[in-house]
Image: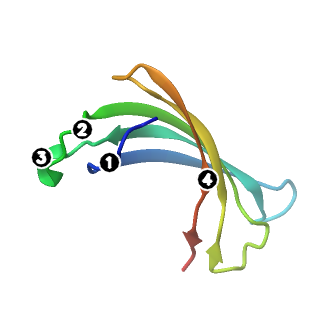
Amino acid sequence: GIGSLTGLSVASMANFTFYKKDQIKKVQPLRLGVGFMALNAINSITGSNDESDIGMVALASFQPLNTDSKVNFPIYAGFGYLFEHDNWFLLLGPGIKFTF
């Protein structure tokens, strides 16, 4: 696994949204993202002794089709690679999205 995740971690992602053909402002339910994450990046603040690591991540999110709602619960799936530990990992789980 990834470990205890007790330190502060930071992530930076680029999110790609796809629109339906011949329809203005109609979003498809699939979004793709790629980026980097730093696990336990700031150990001195939290007092954690866990090893820090940098990884690359690719995610796909499946958004609900009702786009008028202020609260949505997307499903996330993806994979990543940790450079320091030299291993691959999978990500799967729910999310929450607020629209103001």
Q: Which is more N-terminal, label 4 or label 2?
A: 2
Horizontally, residue 32 falls left or right of residue 45, namely right
For label 3, the SS is helix
Q: Amino acid at mark 2?
A: Asp
Give me the disc on residue 50.
2
Give how far across and how far down residue 19 sits, in percent.
Answer: 76, 55
**Residue 26: quarter of image:** bottom right
Give me the disc on residue 44.
3
Residue linked to disc 4: 93
For label 1, the SS is loop
Mark 2 or 4, closer to the camera:
2
Horizontally, residue 64 falls left or right of residue 87, namely right
What residue is shown at x 25% (from left), y 42% (from top)?
Answer: 41
**Residue 83: quarter of image:** top left
Q: Amino acid at mark 4?
A: Gly
For label 2, the SS is loop
Give how far across and how far down residue 22 sits, in percent.
Answer: 87, 57
Horizontally, residue 20 falls left or right of residue 1, namely right
What residue is shown at x 47% (from left), y 39% (from top)?
Answer: 35
CA gap, disc 1 and disc 4: 18 Å
CA gap, disc 3 and disc 4: 30 Å
Q: Which is more N-terminal, label 4 or label 3?
A: 3
Residue linked to disc 1: 9
